Amino acid sequence: MRTNHLQRVLSLFMAVVLMGISTFGFAQPPHPSQHQGHNILTSITVTSDIDGFWLFIDDILQNEQPAKSVRLDQVPEGEHYLRVEMDDPEHHTIGQLVYINPANNRFLVEKQRHLYGISIGRMVPRPEVVMPLVVQRNSHHQGNNRHGYRHANVMPAPPVPSVPMVMNAEEFQNALGRVKSEDFESNRLTAAKRIVNNNYFTVDQIDQLCRLLEFDSSRMEFVKHAYPRCVEPTKYYMLRDLFSFDSYKQELDKFIDQQQ
């Protein structure tokens, strides 16, 4: 009796062990997420308040006909070379390296006097053209559109310009402090000029330095001196707000025209 009972216990134990091995043998590892490794896609809208344009992304033509507003969908997040060719007699071309993501995907083509530029823009209610991003165009399609494809074939894409490194944030704050430490206007102007001579600056940095000067005459002298050291010459017109009198604003406009 005791032997039979022991045999039943051993049989039950072996059955449990075998079930465990079987279950372990068929266990499946978890599947990786289906989105793992996929690029984040977003949209980009480019708008012009002046003329229509052809839009190029990474030197690939997007819209076959010129338009004043274009929205592209399925654009991978990251750095892209954005270029527009205006539908005007001179075919002005503006190119800029931009970082596109859902929070930075609206761009405005603007013109101040005869200067063109691309800046962070606004969303238009209904773009003229809405289309997915074109990533490649077949060569046998080229030439169908006289204007847009003429640009793609005849005009080689300009290389991304090498932009000098501007003064970093920490160095710039030190520069501001150096200018502020001067008690007299003339000394502040001299200190600001010396700093500009050996560095490169954005328009915003030049604006901040200029606001440490009190008089329009000093500010005008400084912005003229700083122009060759600015990495954003197409945005130099934004410094007009520094001046209280229209005569100085007009002088700045004339100066910018002469530099161009």
Image (spheres, rainbow, N blue to C red):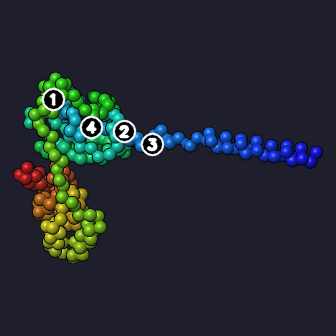
Mark 1: give few (<14), some (14-19) or many (20+) Cα within 10 Å: some
Determine the residue positioned at 64% across, 43% down.
Answer: 24
Residue 219 x/y as whole percent: 16, 63
Q: Amino acid at mark 2?
A: Thr
Q: Amino acid at mark 3?
A: Gln
Residue 112 x/y as whole percent: 16, 45
Q: CA distance from mark 1 to mark 2?
A: 26 Å
Mark 2: give few (<14), some (14-19) or many (20+) Cα within 10 Å: some
Q: CA distance from mark 1 to mark 4?
A: 19 Å
The residue to which callout 4 is attached is: 46
CB under 8 Å between callouts 1 and 4?
no
Among the two numbered marks 2 and 3 on one chain, the one whose residue lies closer to the N terminus = 3
Among the two numbered marks 3 and 4 on one chain, the one whose residue lies closer to the N terminus = 3
Q: Nearer the viewer, mark 1 or mark 4?
A: 1
Per the image, label 4 sits on a secondary structure element best described as strand
Per the image, label 1 sits on a secondary structure element best described as helix
Q: Nearer the viewer, mark 2 or mark 4?
A: 2
- Can you tell which mark lies on residue 5? none
Determine the residue positioned at 42% across, 43% down.
Answer: 37
The residue to which callout 3 is attached is: 36
Does 99 sit above or below residue 186?
above
User: Which residue appears farthest toward the right when viewing the image?
Assistant: 1
Q: Which of 106 and 81 lies nearest the eye of the viewer?
A: 81
Among the two numbered marks 1 and 2 on one chain, the one whose residue lies closer to the N terminus = 2
The residue to which callout 1 is attached is: 149
Mark 4: give few (<14), some (14-19) or many (20+) Cα within 10 Å: many
CB under 8 Å between callouts 1 and 2?
no
Does 231 sit above or below residue 90?
below
